[in-house]
């Protein structure tokens, strides 16, 4: 690895709130999407002559369609409660990374063109003309937001910057300014079936290889079924679980759980991706089109349950949006929803998180573990932002915090939480979420990881923690990349089901 | 009628119309704009009753702000509670006979003005002293605080220092409400106080004061966490479904 071309922040006991440094990350610009992916998605690929009208037109549409954006544009009083809550601000000191300032980039335009005071006296109320410079700022700073929603926890009106960032990216896409990384992934998942762009035969080979590995390792023929019609459970998991380290260790963990439970399950080559980058770009139709693959696969295979693997934003989309987008869930009485509901097993929540599934089996005593097999590990758990603040597990609010920890404690002897103000609903993003997991944003990613790295360093130093347990594919990839910048071993990173897979007893 | 009385009468009719009509229109806008996805900031209540409790904690106690920053919470809460008591105390100028509890809270309402102004002063100080808050403050943020403090101080001046003829004020206000006009007293402090209040009423529907109705429509706070049990679908999203079915 070549040395970084930027200064990696020093670790400190507490994450200090920096003095603002204007323009500190103004130069950080993610690569712009090219024509091929943009036109596939139905967007232009360069700024059209009438870009200004298009921006305002799209903004008007967003304001009509999303109550969140409309209310959030008006409600902010500039109190400052959010100003020290964003990990990117804490890591970069750029004031435009303060949530309120990030929102203001859009609010200035909103005031100028959509409110009376902004039309009459823009100088008074902080309204500004829409210029190409505005769009540049939008692009740069809406790609320095991981849509983690930490600011929304602390805002007295619940203003969620993620909603503004999504709207900003959506508007930018409509005038040809898309982000290369997200744009290409949105094409791959729709054309090929997953974000990594790996075709069905490659997936089949990989699963066969993994089955051989597990059998060689344990002597037990644990299967990884693909496209099995009539299976009871469809597992939808991020494609990184098939091909990346340490992700694949969790996939092995899921397979072992299903095996030990004697479950009938299958993966789908059509729905070989739980991730849905449609969320990140704020385009409802794209998000819906990607989510529909899961519904289609479920109907084709005739499954009765849908379970989602370890992936943060995927779980938010699955838990909170699938019912709306695809009818996977309950309560809908329209023909579209009912068609699916009559196939699904009503005894279970739909969809279900793999942690809910595993914890349920542990509580029922179905799974047996040799916890000592994890004794070389002192484990801490990082709450992934989308799971923590955008979803739930189990029946009680906060189950998304207790269930993964309960699983870890059930399969391992050494567990330590990080500082309370850095976990649970206050968790810090890994720094790579929301479509930022690309090398052209490595500086933002490294600096944005600072608050989490400080909290992690404290338990490494104080409690000898040596394993960072995760339930998100993006977190896993981000920490694997970023840990070495802060002097940690990248092999400290792993999944919760990697721990389950280590300790589970098979027969 | 004196020109003073006519001016203030017209001013208050306009201010009242703008305030009520403007806020009603904004509420209508918020209400008619759909929330297409279930986006409560979790952990969130799973029932409507739970949401009501969460919203009440936000509105009465400023719970999220308390989590965020104790100074902003302290100043913000002092100001709002002070303002609430002061406003309730003022009901007596708009009713005859005066309700018992309005009578009862008079002394509290009087002294609440100190909390109100102290809170505002604290909030204003932060706009100068904290570099992050200074960066995000616009001229209108400063003017809003100046306006509120001026209203508070002019009111306190009449309560504690140079008493105005409140019997005449009350007659003027009741007269506006019953179209049985009485003269507006020509007290400069009172004139300033009422003029600034009218200005505040007029800018309310086009300013950040919309945070007051806004919070009740904030989807991250007013939605129940029930997406697996309930299908949330906006009319425009349902139309997409029909078009493609």
Image (spheres, coloured by chain):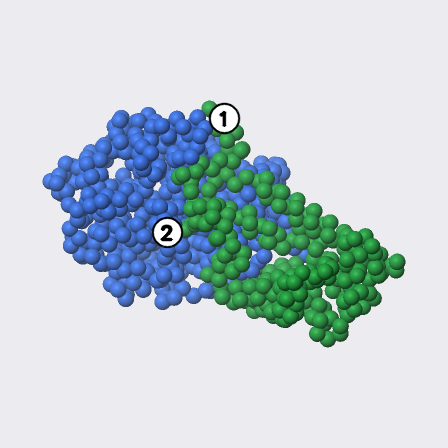
Chain colours: A blue, B green
In the image, is A286 to the left or to the right of A359? right
Q: Is residue A347 left or right of residue B95?
A: left
Q: Which mark is residue A398?
A: 2
Dot 1: chain letter: B
Closer to us: A369 or A72:
A369
What residue is shown at x 83% (from left), y 59% (from top)?
B182
Name the element at disc 2. loop
Residue B242 - label: 1
Neighbours of disc 1 within 10 Å: few (<14), some (14-19), many (20+): few
How far apart marks 1 and 2 lie (CA) works out to 36 Å
Looking at this view, name the residue that lies furthest to the left.
Answer: A219
Residue at position x 43%, y 59% from top?
Answer: A91
Along the line of sight, the residue nearer the viewer: B50 or B190 = B50
Q: Residue at x 54, y 56 (%)?
A: B59
Image location (x, y in percent) of residue A378: 23, 58
The secondary element bearing badge 1 is classed as: helix
Image coords of residue B1 (percent x, y): 88, 58
Specify the farthest residue to the top: B245
Would residue A188 be visible to someone looking at this image?
Answer: no
Q: Which mark is residue B89?
A: none
Total marks in image = 2
């Amino acid at each position: 690895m070549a040395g970084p071309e930027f200064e990696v922040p020093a670790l400190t006991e507490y994450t200090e709130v920096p003095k603002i440094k204007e323009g500190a990350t103004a130069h950080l610009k993610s690569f712009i999407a090219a024509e091929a992916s943009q036109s596939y998605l139905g967007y232009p690929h360069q700024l059209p002559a009438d870009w200004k009208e298009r921006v305002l037109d799209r903004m008007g549409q967003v304001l009509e369609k999303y109550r969140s954006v409309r209310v959030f544009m008006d409600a902010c009083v500039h109190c400052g409660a959010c100003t020290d809550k964003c990990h990117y601000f804490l890591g970069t000191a750029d004031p435009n990374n303060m949530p309120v300032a990030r929102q203001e980039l859009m609010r200035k335009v909103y005031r100028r063109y959509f409110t009376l005071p902004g039309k009459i006296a823009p100088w008074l109320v902080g309204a500004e003309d829409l210029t190409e410079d505005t769009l540049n700022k939008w692009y740069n700073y809406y790609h320095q937001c991981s849509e983690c929603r930490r600011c929304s926890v602390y805002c007295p009106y619940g203003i969620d910057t993620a909603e503004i960032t999504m709207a900003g990216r959506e508007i930018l896409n409509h005038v040809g300014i898309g982000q290369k990384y997200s744009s290409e992934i949105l094409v791959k998942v729709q054309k090929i079936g997953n974000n990594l762009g790996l075709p069905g035969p490659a997936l089949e080979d990989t699963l066969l290889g993994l089955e051989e590995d597990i059998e060689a390792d344990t002597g037990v023929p644990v299967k990884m079924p693909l496209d099995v019609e009539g299976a009871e459970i469809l597992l939808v998991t991020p494609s990184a679980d098939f091909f990346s380290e340490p992700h694949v260790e969790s996939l092995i963990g899921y397979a072992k759980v299903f095996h030990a439970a004697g479950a009938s399950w299958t993966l789908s080559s059509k729905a070989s991706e739980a991730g849905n980058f449609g969320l990140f770009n704020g385009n409802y139709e794209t998000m819906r089109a990607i989510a529909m693959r899961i519904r289609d696969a479920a109907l084709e295979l005739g499954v009765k349950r849908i379970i989602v693997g370890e992936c943060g934003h995927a779980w938010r989309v699955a838990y909170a949006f699938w019912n709306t987008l695809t009818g996977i869930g309950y309560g809908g009485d329209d023909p579209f929803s009912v068609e699916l509901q009559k196939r699904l097993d009503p005894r279970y929540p739909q969809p279900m998180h793999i942690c809910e599934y595993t914890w349920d089996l542990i509580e029922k005593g179905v799974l047996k573990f040799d916890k000592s097999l994890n004794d070389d590990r002192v484990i801490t758990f990082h709450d992934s932002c989308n799971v923590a603040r955008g979803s739930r597990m189990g029946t009680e609010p906060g189950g998304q915090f207790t269930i993964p920890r309960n699983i870890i404690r059930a399969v391992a002897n050494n567990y330590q939480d990080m500082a309370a103000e850095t976990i649970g609903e206050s968790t810090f993003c890994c720094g790579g979420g929301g479509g930022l997991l690309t090398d052209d944003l490595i500086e933002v990613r490294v600096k944005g990881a600072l608050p989490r790295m400080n909290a992690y360093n404290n338990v490494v130093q104080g409690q000898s923690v040596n394993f960072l347990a995760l339930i998100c594919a993006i977190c896993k990839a981000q920490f694997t990349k970023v840990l070495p910048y802060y002097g940690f071993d990248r092999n400290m990173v792993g999944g919760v089901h990697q721990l389950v897979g280590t300790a589970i007893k098979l027969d | 009628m004196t020109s003073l009385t006519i001016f203030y009468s017209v001013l208050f009719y306009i201010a009242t119309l703008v305030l009520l009509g403007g806020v009603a229109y904004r509420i209508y806008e918020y209400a008619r704009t759909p929330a297409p996805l279930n986006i409560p900031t979790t952990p969130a209540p799973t029932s409507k009753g739970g949401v009501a409790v969460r919203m009440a904690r936000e509105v009465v106690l400023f719970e999220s702000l308390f989590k965020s920053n104790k100074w902003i919470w302290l100043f913000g809460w002092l100001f709002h509670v002070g303002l609430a008591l002061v406003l309730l105390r003022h009901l007596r100028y708009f009713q005859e006979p005066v309700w018992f509890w309005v009578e009862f809270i008079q002394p509290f309402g009087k002294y609440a003005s100190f909390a109100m102004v102290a809170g505002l002063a604290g909030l204003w100080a932060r706009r100068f002293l904290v570099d992050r808050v200074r960066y995000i403050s616009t001229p209108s943020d400063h003017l809003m605080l100046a306006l509120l403090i001026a209203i508070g101080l002019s009111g306190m001046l009449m309560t504690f220092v140079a008493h105005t003829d409140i019997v005449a004020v009350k007659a003027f206000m009741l007269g506006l409400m019953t179209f049985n006009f009485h003269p507006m007293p020509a007290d400069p402090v009172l004139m300033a106080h009422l003029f600034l209040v009218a200005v505040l009423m007029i800018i309310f529907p086009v300013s950040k004061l919309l945070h007051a109705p806004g919070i009740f429509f904030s989807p991250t706070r007013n939605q129940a966490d029930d997406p697996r049990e309930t299908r949330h679908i906006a009319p425009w999203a349902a139309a997409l479904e029909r078009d493609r079915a």
